[in-house]
Image: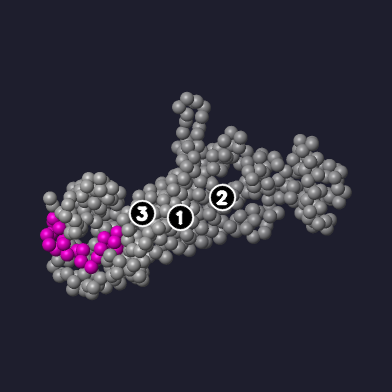
Amino acid sequence: MSKKIASARISEKSSQLLQDLNNSLPFDKLLYREDIEGSKAHAFMLAQQGIISKEDYGKIETGLVEILEEIESGIFTLNGDDEDIHMAIEGRLTQKIGDAGKRLHTARSRNDQVALDFRLYVQRSTKEIAEFLLKNITTLIKVAEEHTETLLPGMTHLQHAQPINFAYHMMAYASMFKRDYERFISSYERNNYSPIGCAALAGTPHPINRKITAEKLGFYTPTLNCLDTVSDRDFALEILFNVATMMMHISRLSEELILWSASEFRWVTLSDRHATGSSIMPQKKNPDIPELLRGKTGRVNGNLVGLLTVMKGLPLAYNKDMQEDKEGVFDSVRTALLSLRVLDEMIAEMKVNTEQMEKACMIGHLSATDLADYLVREAGLPFRDAYHITGNVVNLAEEKKMDISELSLSDLQSIDKRIGENVMILLDNRASMNARRSEGGTATIRTLDQIKSLKAWLLAQG
């Protein structure tokens, strides 16, 4: 039998079951670009350091470029007997250029090679997701700019609480996505260090220069400790956490869109392009897109917990358990990018039913807190006393089947004579919304400040 490239110690043919369990090529073939790029940089460094000849480097470089073209054109299919993408490409390179191809693996191990390929993938995916987050923030701002005067009930416990404007609500999600963006960028900065050159776990006796490969591949500098480096998957855990947190934010927004599009609300109407019908009920228009976004949060949470569980008991350094690090990351990245694209499109195309939102503000006595604040400010009452007086006013409004803002002055003074005529304007929902002028508040002037601030931040991101 012919021996595998990386099986010098093994004298018997592997069990088919072992091969099935061990073979990672079906999923890690996604890393072919990163593997070829890393190999080109490694070969360049070996030649620069005189570890391989310039002639061999030239053959390796040309061969790797050709293999990339073969893979992308379908000439070289990555579905053979090779156990992973690294061996597949090295084997093909040796077929093409002979002994020069066998020199490529000098001064490296699959341990640092896979750490490099995977880190390159995660770093690029981190930047890609971050860029899409900026696009989503921009879309939310555009919607917000159209609705700085649109009233809707702000809620706690899913109960009507105080009047806010719809722009303010959109800016809350834009703020979440800003934090998500900053989280991804922070991870990128923290993890932008090169693993290649660490070899199996302890470095190499060859006179390599890790700074050359780091610079060639766009890293800041090499990692500090090789034992840590080959067993480190913090960068993978970070992107999984960042995606899970981002998807939690997307899920919260999706939940609101689902509620708001229901007949009981009718605050928004999703475009027909982002809804589906029923197989049996012809009148139905289902919010399947936000429901799917809400549901996909579960799978990315599972990917995070899965890798945390794989890593929790591993001794230093590399262990084969770590082959389980990639599929969850690949899945979470795909899910994140698709979710951001569809969310952005759906938000941009949804119709905001402003009349329905403003009508809903007449339910739940949204300006009640303004009455309590008035009694504190104008009558000098302790807030708790003002709170109970306002509760009695609300009870009166309930008996009359009216909103507190619709009560007459005589109604209000029947509860407490200290309520003056100047309170009437304060109980108007729009006045109540605009009264909340403290920094970060919902008043239109403050919402506009938030929009301006976030637009300036966007510009600063380049």
Identity, as a three-letter code, of the amino acid under mark 2: Met
Q: Which mark is residue 241?
A: 1
**Nearest the camera: 70 or 151?**
70
Task: Locate residue 236: give its quadrant.
Answer: bottom left
x, y percentage for residue 30?
30, 51
- 216 is higher (above) or lower (below) than 410: below
Q: Which mark is residue 170?
A: 2
* Secondary element type, mark 1: helix
Residue at numbered disc 3: 325
**Residue 37 belongs to magenta span:** no
For this view, does 342 lie left or right of residue 148?
left
How far apart in space, not on screen, are marks 3 and 1 (Cα)? 14 Å
Residue mark closest to the camera, 2 vs 1: 1
What residue sits 68% from the left and 48% below the top?
162
**Nearest the camera: 32 or 178?**
32
x, y percentage for residue 321?
34, 54
Residue mark closest to the camera, 3 vs 2: 3
How far apart in space, not on screen, are marks 2 and 1 (Cα)? 24 Å
Which stretch appears magenta?
Answer: 94-116
Identity, as a three-letter code, of the amino acid under mark 1: Phe
Identity, as a three-letter code, of the amino acid under mark 3: Asp
Q: How many C-alpha atoms fall within 10 Å of the one at disc 3: few (<14), some, or many (≥20)?
A: many
* Secondary element type, mark 3: helix
